[in-house]
Amino acid sequence: MKTKTSILFAAFILFLNFSCSKSDIEKGFDCVGESLFIKLKNSTDATNAKKMNYEIEYRGEHTFKSVKWTFGDGTTETVTTKTVSHIYPSAGTFTVKADVTIENGKLTCTSSPTRSVTIN
């Protein structure tokens, strides 16, 4: 029993020595925190009922880089703008996902908000 306790204690001490310090964590990029600043919006186009306009609203302090859109109908599109439009081939309900990439110097973070949209 003493041997197991000694090994566990030594492993714990090694873990503490090699873990990140508070300053290392503060320098890191908090992806969960950044996801709070990302909002996916959509609106149906006024002239075409099968056309959906999408927008990413980002209010964080880092740099918006790109969005990989998955429209739920088998098509994807990657853009470096916060807005995109998509024409659906038929009526139905689709799950849309936006893989939003944010940049902080050389570090990047991707957050993926989703939304269900109905096309008439």
Image (cartoon, rainbow, N blue to C red):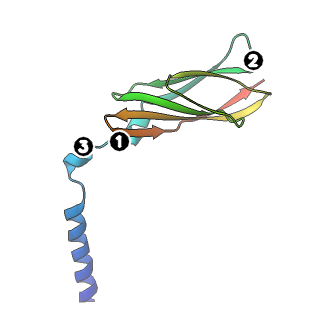
* Residue 91 horizontal/vertical position (percent): 79, 27
* Residue 58 horizontal/vertical position (percent): 44, 26
Residue at position x 52%, y 38% in the image = 112
Can you say whether 36 is above or below 59 in the image?
below
Task: Measure how far apart labels 3 and 1 are at the Cα level.
Answer: 9 Å
Residue neighbourhood size for the residue with mark 3, other residues' Cα within 10 Å, grouped as few (<14), some (14–19), many (≥20): few
106 vs 17, left or right, is: right
Dot 1 corresponds to which residue?
30
* Mark sitting on residue 49: 2
Name the kind of residue labelled 3 in the image. Answer: Glu
Task: Measure how far apart labels 2 and 3 are at the Cα level.
Answer: 47 Å
Can you say whether 49 is above or below 21 in the image?
above
* Mark sitting on residue 63: none
Q: Are marks 2 and 1 in contact (CB under 8 Å)?
A: no
Dot 3 corresponds to which residue?
26
- Quarter of the image containing the N terminus? bottom left
Task: Measure how far apart labels 2 and 1 are at the Cα level.
Answer: 39 Å
Asked which secondary structure carries label 2, the reply is loop
Give the image quarter of residue 12: bottom left
* Residue 101 horizontal/vertical position (percent): 45, 35
117 vs 109, left or right, is: right
Name the kind of residue labelled 1 in the image. Answer: Asp
Residue at position x 47%, y 38% in the image = 111
Asked which secondary structure carries label 1, the reply is loop
Name the kind of residue labelled 2 in the image. Answer: Ala
Residue neighbourhood size for the residue with mark 1, other residues' Cα within 10 Å, grouped as few (<14), some (14–19), many (≥20): few
Q: Of label 2 and label 3, which has the lower sequence position?
A: 3
- Quarter of the image containing the C terminus? top right
